[in-house]
Amino acid sequence: MSASAVRLPVPRIPVPRAQRREPLQDIPVPGHKRVLLAAPRGYCAGVDRAVVAVERALERFGSPVYVRKQIVHNLHVVAELEGKGAVFVDEVDEVPEGAHVVFSAHGVAPAVRDAAARRGLQAIDATCPLVTKVHSEAVRFARDGYDILLIGHAWHEEVEGTAGEAPERVTVVGSPDEADTVQVRDPSRLVWLSQTTLSVDETLQTVQRLRARFPELHDPPSDDICYATQNRQTAVTAIAADADLVIVVGSANSSNSVRLVEVALAQGARAAHRVDDAGEIRQEWLDGVATVGVTSGASVPEVLVQGVLADLAAAGYRDIHEVHTAQEDVSFALPGPLRTKGGRR
């Protein structure tokens, strides 16, 4: 690992007491109660980098440091950073002139960078490098005269940022069904790109339906769905068929967490639910359940997963089997303004 790479422990984020409820009860069920714990799960390298970027900016420049949008899509992480002095805003025009502002891991459009520059803001770009890669692809294909079908959710900040690189050339395709109706100018000069946090299977379905209409559709030079998204979907696939219930830890606006619920159900889980933390688990979900699968999205600190496991243990699910499907050793350097001289973080 390079000296400037991020490799730090996850923050210790307590579950707010207001979100707690009565402890889960140990309900007898036939057979042995167990937990299948997916690995890998939780924080990816891009999330690590973004969260540490805000923390390092606060250490170096003092409070407040402003952050455009949620730095990552997790309510607990945002609350923890707010407690340290970060101020989250929707747009850069809410930031005082000359102040420090961090762009979130999901990336921003060039128009946002320009607006920040006009206000004299000290911008720190925490965009995940894998998202930056998709931005670069959009710029290059647009420059070469291609129209771009961007597979993703139009409301998501990542899609807004990528589309903003070439708005006259990008059309967002939100689902396989939308692939059947999208209109293009020149089917011979057409390429698809994708949001990095999508379901792999649904993305492939969308591409297949697009290619059925546009046989000359070009592929991106490399896979746009990030390694962490794919690894977490593979891991939940490995436990889903054996689980009576899958619990996915992650916030509602986390695309990759929501996709994990969908993948779990598609791969044979009897039931699957997303929770922000252990306090959202409902007693009735465990009725008659012998095997619980547990995983978490790429913006979720491990302490929240451990809280879920502790509650499940109190309900009798003390036998934990961690199911490994991949080993992750990816790391990204911090944004340039936060690196010390000599390149060390």
Image (spheres, rainbow, N blue to C red):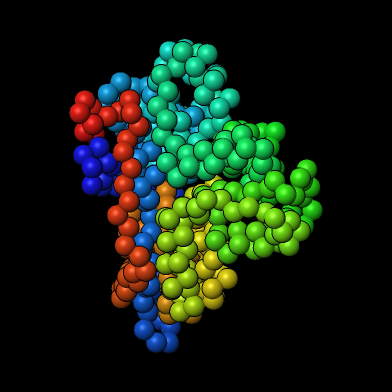
Between residue 12 and residue 14, name the one nearer to us: 12
Q: Position of residue 88 (x, y in %)?
A: 47, 29
Q: Position of residue 248 (x, y in %)?
A: 46, 61
Could you tell me which residue is drawn at 46 percent across and 56 percent down? 229
Q: How many marks?
A: 0
Q: Position of residue 134 (x, y in %)?
A: 52, 43
Outermost residue, bottom side: 30
Could you tell me which residue is drawn at 28 percent across and 42 percent down? 6
Could you tell me which residue is drawn at 27 percent across and 41 percent down? 5
Between residue 288 and residue 87, name the one nearer to us: 87
Looking at the image, is 225 positioned above or below residue 62? below
Looking at the image, is 269 positioned above or below residue 194? below
Looking at the image, is 72 positioned above or below residue 283? above
Looking at the image, is 144 positioned above or below residue 214? above
Name the image quarter holding residue 198.
bottom right
Q: Position of residue 136 (x, y in %)?
A: 52, 38
In this view of the protein, can residue 282 be seen by the observer? Answer: yes
Between residue 126 and residue 266, name the one nearer to us: 126
Could you tell me which residue is drawn at 38 percent across and 24 percent down? 65
In this view of the protein, can residue 24 be seen by the observer? Answer: no
Image quarter where the C terminus lies is top left
Q: Is residue 283 left or right of residue 315?
A: right
Q: Is residue 328 left or right of residue 344?
A: right
